[in-house]
Amino acid sequence: MSGRQEKEKGVNVQVLLRCRPFSDDELRSNAPQVVTCNDYQREVAVSQNIAGKHIDRVFTFDKVFGPSAQQRDLYDQAVVPIVNEVLEGFNCTIFAYGQTGTGKTYTMEGECKRAKSGLNGELPQEAGVIPRAVKQIFDTLEGQNAEYSVKVTFLELYNEEITDLLAPEEISKVAFEEKQKKPLPLMEDGKGGVLVRGLEEEIVTSASEIFTLLERGSSKRRTAETLLNKQSSRSHSLFSITIHIKEPTPEGEELIKCGKLNLVDLAGSENISRSGAREGRAREAGEINKSLLTLGRVISALVEHLGHIPYRDSKLTRLLRDSLGGRTKTCIIATVSPAVHCLEETLSTLDYAHRAKHIKNKPEVNQKMMKSTLLKDLQGEIDRLKAEVYAAREKNGVYIPKERYYQEESERKEMADQIEQMGLTIETHEKQLEELQEKYDVQVRHCSDLSTKLAHTERNLLETSRLLANTEEELKKLRIENALSQQACALRSDLEKALKDNASLFDKIGREDQLHSENRSVVNSFQSELSQQIGCLRSIVANSMSQQDEHLQCVGKLCHSFMQTHDKVVKKLKKKLTNTRTVYASHIEALQNVVRLHKSNSIAGLDEMSTLASSNAQSIEDYLASEGVQAAAVFDDLRNALSAHQGEMAIFARELRQRFNSSSEQTKQISDYTDGFLCKLMDQSQTIQNHVMGVDNIQMNSIADFQKAYEEQCKSEADKLVADISNLLSNHILRQKELVNTRLDVLREAAVENRTFMDGQVSSLENITTEAKRKWKEFCVQAGSEAKDGADYSAAKHCRMEILLQQSVTNAESAFQHCKKTRDSVNEMCTEHVSSLSTLVRDATENIEQHDAEIDSARTAAEQDVATNSQDILQHIDGMSAQERESVSGIVTTVEAHTKTLETFREDHSGQAAVMENKSQETFQQRFMDYDPTGTTPMRTEPEVPSKGTIESLRAMPMEALVEEFRENNSYDSFEVKELKPSLIPRPPLAQLN
Ligand code: ADP
Ligand code: MG
């Protein structure tokens, strides 16, 4: 679309859709996904299951950004071109629309306002549209090395009240309460636009400053807790960037290009009941709805092309009037959540956005301003402000109370609106009046036209009635004329036909002449060709004759050579036949010899076989007889051995019993002896004990005696020495006495110990002996019983052995009988075998004899056959060669006859050819006659025929045609008499022709 068309038709609002990814909460609750985005097809599909029914809705937008789309993707694809247009001098607006929590603020501002831009001016990944746009603007402007200024404003619309988000901190802190009550007023700027009075315009000099501004502004935004989102913002925010760029012109003047970008973060689109707004916030929710509802109504009105667009119903729509159906380029970013619990709101957002696609704007570049005019404007503004300040300071201006001022202001505003509307009505009325005046003029003109037409018509009527009278008279004359002209026409057509016939006859004569001369030349050429061809034919015939002669000679020769070879072959064949016969006879002879040899061999073999069989039978018999004797002897031996065994066994058993008895006797004796030995041992131990006791007593006594004696001696010696050594010696004696006593005690103790040891030993010896005795007795008893068991067992075994021996004897007997039987049957079999073998041999010999006789007869028959066959063949060959000779002689005679026929043919042919030549000469030269002209044929002439038109012109036109023509020339709506068409009425009837 060219720029002009674009301007006239308008461009549609661009609508983008962005679907955010699942939030952590949604992921935790496993919320199902209902929105699927197809970024390439630019489609968004919403699928839902309601009461088992699956409903799919698909929306198409200008661009679609799915959950995976990054901030950068959205910016690069959708916003970069818009910012470029702003730099070109357009005004552009970007709206973010959608349910709370779907990412409007995320899209517009981004999430890392606090994070300053990177080292090389890179923006953080999460940065939204605003910082990116500012960066792009600065990058572009710096790249162009242009002189420029960038101003931003940031305001909030909350409860239909405007707050400056960039107002200096101190003031806002001090006058916070006041500000709440007295928001910034929205004023008409007198150029059809609106402006916010007192809004802070911040001049930005670098992209990085934007973070500080955003942070300052966002912190002031009001957020209130709703059921949907704690951070949910209930207010709209509008961030505007205004750019002025200086552009030098060739004339040296400086132009200022101006562009403005509005970035609008709308409040959540959810309705009041859904957001669960209660009590104090009811009004707030209502007001928000007012702005959003008005926005919706404005969109509807624009889409349906209604006359009245309710821009004035809310502040939001007043502020953004130019972005909706105005001269601004507009883009709406609709944001949705993919989760099922937002489904209803998602669908309404999609519908809303889809409808907004149909809004058309007519973007216009802002008028470039001369720098001087801008300066003048600014100067005017400064002056005005100065005056205001002065008036305020000096209090010499008009002072009115603020309430009244605002009241008057609003009245003034209303009146301005009314005036505007009235102006509009007057305009439309004037337009209507003009239209009516135009219509009236048209009607008057039409009336005068009609009256002039009427006068004309009356005049025409008079003229026409006069003409009619004339015409009627003429008509009568015309009728007569018509009959004559008809006849003339008929005659003319006859004449024309005759002339045509004449011409075609002359043509025919000419063609015949030409044909004749052509025929003449054809005949001449044919004659020469004929003679030539006859000559050719003659030479061909002569050639063919000589060739045929050659062929016939060849045939004769071939017949001759064939006969020669044939004779030779017949001779050879006969020779071969006789040879074959002799060879055959000799072969048959050899065959018979072989048969004879075989026969003698067979007979000899058979004889040998029968003798061998009989000798075999004899030897088997002999062998069996000798074997029978040996077997009997072996059996006898066996029987003897068995009986001997039996006897030995009995003896062995008896001896065994005797030995067993003696051994048990011996055992008994040993046992008795051992018993006695043990008793003795017991006695001995008793005596030892007694002895030990006695020794002990003796020892004790001797010790006691020694003690007594020593004490008595000591006493007597002491008594003796007491006098001398009284004290000294007493000590010594005491000491000696103690020493001896201790020694004696030790001695006694040793004796006691000895005795107790001996006692223990003796008692243990006694215990062992009694134990041995008891054991031995047990053993004796057991041995006795076991010996008895052994005797019983051996007796039983002996009996068993006896039985087995008996069995063996009987077995041997039966085996011997069996052997005898076997021998008899073998003998019998042998004799049978020998007799059957001899009969077989006899049969075989007879067979061989018969065979021999058959071979003999076959041989004689074969020899006879061969003789007769060879005779037949010889006769056959003779007959065949006679036939062949005959046919060859037939061929020779035929060849000779053929040669003669050829000779006559040659003669006939040359005669006929000569005749043909003569005949053709005669026919074409003498008989074929040419046409002789007589000179009486008339010459070709072209008489003149009067044209159809001239005859037709004699005729008058039929009445209907005339009437038709008249009507045509004099239509009802035109009353002017028109000139009659001359072609149809060339002359008055019955006028002179020439
Ligand atoms: P709104 O302004 O529409 O109420 P927000 O912009 O405050 O929604 O987004 C709500 C939450 O969802 C925020 O925590 C934000 O980080 C997250 N969010 C929204 N859109 C996206 C997105 N496209 N990618 C990642 N997180 C997102
Ligand atoms: Mg938000």
Image (spheres, helix red, strand yellow):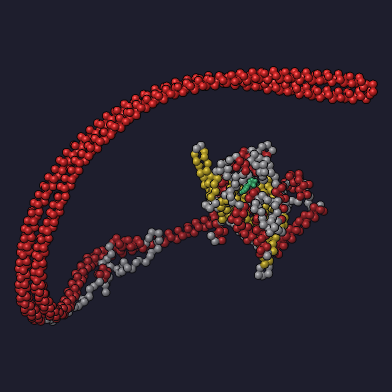
Residue at figure coordinates x 22%, y 66% from the top left: 486
Q: Relative to 610, is 636 on the left or the right? A: right
Q: Relative to 221, is 849 on the left or the right? A: left
Q: Nearer the viewer, residue 757 or 509?
A: 757
In this view, 781 is above or below 302: above
In this view, 940 is above or below 331: below
Query: Residue 3: x percent and y percent?
Result: 56, 61
Residue at figure coordinates x 67%, y 42% from the top left: 230
Inspect this view and state whether residue 307 appears: no
Residue at figure coordinates x 11%, y 47% from the top left: 849
Query: Residue 104: x percent and y percent?
Result: 63, 48
In this view, 638 is above or below 836: above
* Circle count: 0
Residue 692 quadrant: top right
Residue 576 quadrant: bottom left
Q: Relative to 554, is 667 on the left or the right? A: right
Query: Residue 503: x percent and y percent?
Result: 19, 74
Residue at figure coordinates x 20%, y 34% from the top left: 828
Inspect this view and state whether residue 700 appears: yes
Q: Nearer the viewer, residue 687 or 167?
A: 687
- Which part of the image, by quadrant, shows the C terminus? bottom left
Furthest residue toward right = 724
Query: Residue 679: x percent and y percent?
Result: 61, 18
Q: Nearer the viewer, residue 798 or 932?
A: 798
